[in-house]
Amino acid sequence: MRARLASPRFRFRTPLKRQAQTTSKLGTPLFVHQALHDQGNRPGIGAKTTPAQAGLPAENNPINEPLGAVLISTLRIRCVANSLPGEYNKAYQPQQEAQVAQARPTHPHYEADMLSVEDARERILSFFRVLEAEEKPLLQALGQTLAEDIRSPINLPQWANSGMDGYAVRAEDIAGASGSSPRVLPVVGTVAAGQMPARRLEPGTAVRIMTGAPVPPGADTVVAFEDTDELERKASGRGLGEIGILRAEPKGASVRPAGEDVRAGEIVLARGATLSPAGIGVAASVGRTSARVVRRPVVAVLSTGDELQLPGEELAPGKIYDVNGYSVAGAVLKAGGIPNVLGIAPDDPAAMNAKISEGLQADVLITSAGVSKGDYDFVKDVLGERGSVEFWSVRMRPAKPLAFGLLRGPSGRQVPHIGLPGNPVSALVAFEQLCRPALLKMQGRTRLDRPVVEATLEDAIRNSDGRRVYARVWVSRRNGEYVARLTGPQGSNVLTPLSRANGLAICPEDVPVLNAGDKAVVQMIDWPEEAML
Ligand code: AMP
Ligand code: MG
């Protein structure tokens, strides 16, 4: 397998470009242009390169079309458009396309073959599938995606039952009752929760009843204890042979009708739903103890580099502790995956090969480090022998360099490999943008984007080289508006500011600086994808 996919440089023909721009609903062609621009100038994969030609197995590619065509199709353009929130476009509309087109090629750091974040993400996503279903005990299935519709075999509630501790009566027997004019009824029995009433309620009588207990046939209304003279009767030692009703409750008061929540045969939880605490409660309420859910992906996490040592050991001179083994595995856990932490592979082919063999038991292998230029030759050799590997430059800061490939797993299974950059902030930001969506997709989730808010910046964010900047910020609400401040220095090696951040504020590719007071789109990295704004 070639390490880099070679094919002639592909340039856009005008009609395609025009079609893409007119089908976009963005209101500005800026980002569409960008997507086209990126793709059109990227050497390597041409519009006509099929997945097979690119060495990528067709069965793992959802759209069996030439890669370039997939990426520049109307569908694709809409993906780019949809993944950018409305605010993003509104806020930066003044950045004119002409200006952008002019600025890029002359920029000192301009790299024509960089992939946009969206392109990198879509390419990666195209190699991931929803995993198989498994039957799991309800509690263990919490957070997983239902792979079946759960139907109720019963009505819920099964019978009309009391919503209060009180007395079951007929509404017509207590008409006109009040504190000054109680209706006194003989008490003919008691029904506790978990019992069925012994007999029908005869007109002119009352039955003492507890919350959740079945309302006896013949009764249509429950009067709460507070609206009776029960306390006075008990205090005066008169006993509860009869009860004074102090309130004329309307018919049906405090009676929860049969089938109010669920009718027998109804779907109570639909396939595709993420099982929440209430969800597993609903499944239990219809008698289930387990459910078929999409299984969680096993993710092998491997740190590479001669300089790394495991925390807990005494650091030798020149060495540093392995951060990514922990942080990336933590991110995998938070994304619903099962991390298999492989530890450290030093920069040595034999050691690396052994670790990769272990990693190929997983659904996906995530490595960190060794993917930046000048560094990746060794990684390229080792991975190239086991499948395909491409090295990408993604137009983002941090986390420009990235490796992606498909490795041969046991019995010919293709195992996607994502090679994150080594700097700890880069590794996590790249995970957030490119790995997390893939892990969610494998779990059958359909919302793959974190929610975004528009926040007023309290600090400037600078963009020195035309990449999309993800600045580590803390977002809070002030006077009903979101404000965002940087949580510390923004170097890709400086991890503590990320540990204090709840958002990544975006300075777009084409904006050289966002000043304090400017609005920025902020990706909320501690909000679930399902959060609605
Ligand atoms: P590399 O991608 O190999 O060039 O590494 C970039 C930077 O990240 C270097 O300073 C490495 O020492 C550092 N680095 C790589 N892997 C890790 C890791 N697992 N934990 C902490 N730092 C790392
Ligand atoms: Mg290294």
Image: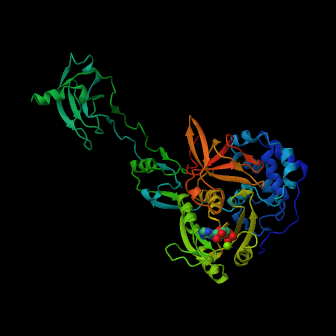
Q: Residue at x 59, y 78 (%)?
A: 317
Nearer-the-camera pick, 235 or 193: 235
Q: Residue at x 29, y 23 (%)?
A: 171
In the rendered image, which quarter contains the N terminus?
bottom right
Would you say 189 lies left or right of 56 here?
A: left
Nearer-the-camera pick, 254 or 517: 517
Residue 383: quadrant of the picture: bottom right
User: Relative to 316, is 116 above or below?
Assistant: above
User: Relative to 492, is 73 above or below?
Assistant: above
Q: Looking at the picture, how far across and down is residue 268, in whole percent? A: 47, 45
Nearer-the-camera pick, 356 or 249: 356
> Where ligand 1 lies, by quadrant?
bottom right
In the rendered image, which quarter contains the C terminus?
top right
Q: Is residue 367 visible?
A: no
Q: Is residue 22 visible?
A: yes
Nearer-the-camera pick, 42 or 293: 42
Q: Looking at the picture, how far across and down is residue 324, in whole percent? A: 59, 67
User: Relative to 490, is 282 above or below?
Assistant: above
Residue 345: quadrant of the picture: bottom right
Looking at the image, the residue that sits furthest to the front is 317
Q: Residue at x 37, y 34 (%)?
A: 257
Would you say 294 lies left or right of 511 here?
A: left
Residue 140: quadrant of the picture: bottom left
Q: Looking at the picture, how far across and down is residue 483, in whole percent? A: 60, 41
Looking at the image, the residue that sits furthest to the right is 14
Q: Looking at the picture, how far across and down is residue 306, in whole percent? A: 63, 78
